[in-house]
Image (cartoon, rainbow, N blue to C red):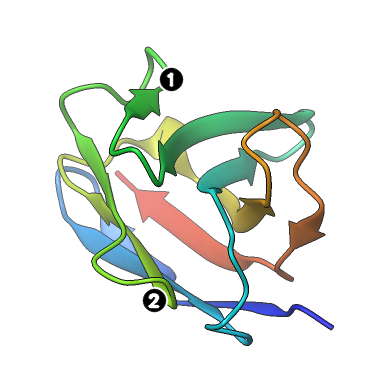
Amino acid sequence: QVELVESGGGSVQAEGSLELSCVLSESDRDICGMAWFRQRPGKNREFVARIRSDGSIAYADSVKGRFTISRPNVKNTYLQMKNLKSEDTAVYHCAADPSCNGRYTYWGQGTQVTVST
């Protein structure tokens, strides 16, 4: 059973930085794509960033230039967040897309990020 565990959330002042971490429980699984999603208060879950095994990366327009996704090895995926804004307040989830077909089969429980002004 694949499990994803996020960490690194917390409270930060606007314009501050945080780095989220996602650890994949089974590092021998061939997971093609990893992504971060978030759910802001009162909103639907939304895409934030994704990275694939071929090195391709995509970001939501709202975070371009401020967030950086990385996956230095099979097990770990990170989301570096800079210049945080109050509208970035959300629960952030990492998700795994084993075949890079857009189907995120595995999800973490999420980590809360709160940005205050």
Identify whether 1 is placed above or below 38: below
**Residue at image mark 2:** 8
- Disc 1 + disc 2, Cβ < 8 Å: no
The amino acid type of the residue labelled 1 equals Ala
Q: Is residue 37 left or right of residue 23?
A: right
- Identify the element where label 1 is drawn: loop
Residue 10 position within the rendered picture, expressed as x and y whole percent measured from the top left: 42, 72
Pick whichever, 114 or 3, lies toward us: 3
Q: Is residue 54 left or right of residue 66?
A: right
Pick whichever, 39 or 73, lies toward us: 73
Query: Residue at (68%, 51%) from the top-left corner?
Result: 98
Identify whether 28 is placed above or below 39: below
Query: Residue at (53%, 45%) from the top-left corner?
Result: 35
The amino acid type of the residue labelled 2 equals Gly
Q: Is residue 91 left or right of residue 42?
A: left
User: Where, by quadrant of the figure, is residue 59 drawn?
Assistant: top left
Other-residue count near label 2 (Cα within 10 Å), few / some / many at <14 / 14–19 / ≥20: some
**Residue at image mark 1:** 60
Query: Residue at (56%, 65%) from the top-left corner?
Result: 112
User: Where, by quadrant of the figure, is residue 56 drawn?
Assistant: top left
